[in-house]
Amino acid sequence: MRTQRASSTSPSRPPTPENRSVGRILDVLDLFLDGGATYTLKDVSDALGIPKSTTHGILHAMHGKGYLTVDPETKRYAVSLRLLGRLSATPTVEILRRRARRHLERLSATLGETTKLIAFEQTHSVAIDCREDTTLLAVRTSWRPAPLPSLSNAASASMKACS
């Protein structure tokens, strides 16, 4: 018969230093994803009650891995598009999609073309939404689109994913 071990977060067993570190990293991630704002190192440290040196290490690592961006002038950190691309179900992407949809539909109807919303940030891109004009396919069956200008591999992949 198997006995259940106490989880590392249970009150019966204090968390190990490794678990506390992971917990702090996840707390920082949650702060950025739930808050939807930009934060300075001090903001994060104060909000989570984490020492500034620990906060700096976490933010530096997350920035180094591309999960956060930092504004060099204000020193404010924000969620990067790379992270949003990995979290396609995040509320931020869905909010952008909902807000942009009517504009994409109007633009598609006006131009008679497929419209795509792609967010770019440095070398990363995220396909947020696309709207296809169905009349374009029915009316111009022999029409061939002109080749697009060369885009980064990430942008090309995002556009193909949306098609």
Image (spheres, rainbow, N blue to C red):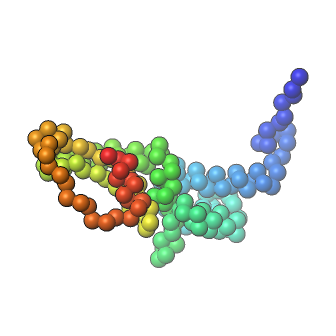
The answer, for residue 85, to whether it is visible in the render is yes
The answer, for residue 42, to whether it is visible in the render is no
For image coordinates 34% across by 53% down, the residue present is 159
Give the number of callouts.
0
For this orientation, the residue located farthest to the bottom is: 73
For this orientation, the residue located farthest to the right is: 1
The percent position of residue 148, horizontal first and vertical second, equals 26, 61
For this orientation, the residue located farthest to the top is: 1
Q: Is residue 126 above or below residue 69?
A: above
For image coordinates 42% across by 59% down, the residue present is 154
Say which of 95 and 47 sits in front: 95
For image coordinates 59% across by 67% down, the residue present is 64
Say which of 59 and 46 sits in front: 59
Which of the 4 quarters of the picture holds residue 52?
A: bottom right
The percent position of residue 83, horizontal first and vertical second, equals 51, 55
Say which of 150 and 57 sits in front: 150
The percent position of residue 152, horizontal first and vertical second, equals 38, 64
